[in-house]
Amino acid sequence: MNDRSKFKFYKIKKYIILQKRYKKTYDENPTPYNKNKYLNTKLFLDNLFKNAREQYYTNISQNLQNKNYSSRKFWNICNTLLKRKMKVNIGDIIHNRKIYKNDKDKVRIIGDYFAEQVTNENNYYDNNIDYNTNSIKNTQYKFPEVTKNMIEQILKNLNIHTANGPDNISNIFLKNTKNSILVPLEYIFNYSLIHGVYPTKWKLSNWTPLHKKDSPYKRENYRPISLCSNMGKILDKIIFKSFYNYLEYNQLLNEYNYGFKRKSSCQHNLSMLLHNTYQNLDKNYDSLILFLDVVKAFDKVDHKILLQKLNLMGIEKNVFLWFKNYLQDRYSRCVIHGYESELYHIQSSVTQGSVLATLLWSIFAYDITENIISNPYIFADDTALVEKIERDDIQNAFNIIQFDIDQLLDWAKNNKIEFSKTKTKYIIVSNSHYHTYPQLYMDNIILERVQNYKQLGLYIDENLNWETHINYTIQKTQKIIHMLKLIRKKIDFATSEKIYKGLIASILDYCCMFYINATQKNIKRITRLIYHCVLIVVKGSRFIPENKLSQELGWNNFYERTNYLSITMFAKIKLTQTPKIIYNTFFIDLPTNIGRNVGKLKIIFSKKNKFYNSFYLK
């Protein structure tokens, strides 16, 4: 589509029609009169578009500088300029060689596909399992008594922009009527927890299709986001907080899974993976890194197996009965532009969009690393395995990873889920690639070896020179820089600075402490990009020295910013504000006479500059 389409609201559509008409007349009868008529109309139309474009960006700039606008409104305007807004309109869907244009047909076609993902084999639902006391640890979890203060605290912090569920009760309504509904909600919540039942109305949800990637014409490229009852979410939040605290305190969550945990992030996962890899290189070992991905992870959770694992967590009988009732008899429907599909029975899955979904998945996958020999690094459903390759015994590392693949396939089969064979790939990180390496297999299918792989937003390559990731980072910022150029003359410094720090600096900051040891050539590309952005923000000349600009603005350069983020992250490790497994890697607890332990930093020696300049050692 022509970029001019967004300026048509300036009532110039009729001139476009005239231009097309005069062009057709000139093509049929190419006289000087018809030519002048067409060219004059074209010139007039070009001027109209130029003025309309200027007015459009002037209006956008004025809105960005409007101090009455909320932060949400500000970023919505930026996303509109970047064409980042989530597409509400779903285009034509092609299925079985037929094109579906009508919303009524599309909601049925997409709804049927979503329903297939949450349906068990033979279309049979089974959660016939009884409560037992065979727990992993000698502990028992019981529900807390819900008080008005608990509910009131959640109601105060409700996001009023959240969409409504099937009951059409909005968060605005709940927030404005909190004084009137506290007592009824307290009674309903406590009755639910004591008797082990979850209100039937709250089990209904609406699926909103969200395009993920690739062709928007295929229904397989959409995923369902469930809109659940906002009242039910309040109860879910109370349960989540209480149950998560119990699981964390009793160490019942998988320590190698960095996802959906407090004090844990993608960067913690990547930092440990890279530390292990650098350590292998420093000892003259290569590293074999296998990346796996679960197919439709949240949609394929079998309820019977999940309840069996909940039993092992050490819960009271009424807690077990509540979760059993919470999972069963759930229904959902697809909704597009007011059109609704039929109701589908959810026979598997933990509902994406519900508060408890992430916690239930963590419980379901807590035993995924059992019998694994290599070093696992997991974030939600993304799994990476790392094993060192001894150059005089290359086959051993591949045997270990192959054994782990077979163990994971057995685990997946027992838990009725599946690993993607097309997305499962591996790289070999090495200083020299002169060896011939064996193949890896998954169900007799040869796995693909790649030169780089994008894991949690970071491109890891075979040489760890970070060129692929830096190229990706620069490319990702180009569109934002172009947008900033279009409006820089019409906005003040404060607005430009806000856009730069919110949209560009945030991209550059992500994992920058890991690729700081890239080649000087690539680091210069990053610093040049930042300098270019600073010139745009201050509307300055390219002859102004970089150091002078940074000093006047009070901004840190790339090295200073990276060092600051590195020190901040390491301080969090020292203060145990990261997963315990990271703290134990670098610190030893020493008892003191003041009643608490003091962490002493472990001494880690390095032979090569690559390991010495890596994040944790530098």
Image: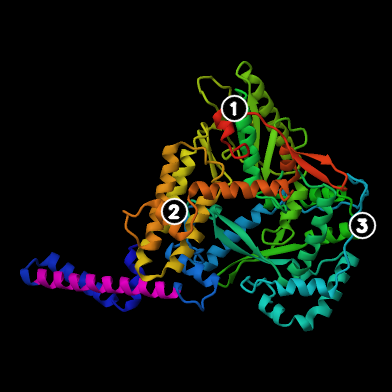
Q: Nearer the viewer, residue 8 or 565?
A: 565
Residue drawn where x is 71% and y is 42% of the image: 582
- Look at the image and tell me whether residue 457 can be seen: no
Please provide percent x and percent y for residue 459.
Answer: 52, 41
Q: Nearer the viewer, residue 519 or 160?
A: 519
Q: Tell me which numbered mark, 2 or 3, is placed earlier along the sequence.
A: 3
Q: Quadrant of the C terminus?
A: top right
Q: Quadrant of residue 9?
A: bottom left
Q: Main secondary structure of the magenta part?
A: helix
Residue 580 colored in magenta in the image: no
Q: Tell me which numbered mark, 3 or 1, is placed earlier along the sequence.
A: 1
Please provide percent x and percent y for residue 359.
Answer: 75, 54
From the image, tell me which residue sits under label 1.
281
> Foreground mark, 3 or 1?
1
Q: Nearer the viewer, residue 31 or 261?
A: 261
Residue drawn where x is 44% and y is 37% of the image: 520
Give the residue type at disc 2: Thr
Q: Is disc 1 surrounded by few (<14), some (14 to 19) or many (20+) residues within 10 Å?
A: many
Q: CA distance from mark 3 to mark 1?
A: 51 Å
Please provide percent x and percent y for residue 448.
Answer: 54, 32
Q: Is disc 2 surrounded by few (<14), some (14 to 19) or many (20+) residues within 10 Å?
A: some
> Foreground mark, 1 or 2?
1
Q: Report the magenta residues as a range.
A: 34-63
Give the residue type at disc 3: Lys
From the image, tell me which residue sits under label 3.
317
- Look at the image and tell me whether residue 586 can be seen: yes
Q: Is residue 12 left or right of residue 482?
A: left
Q: CA distance from mark 2 to mark 3?
A: 53 Å
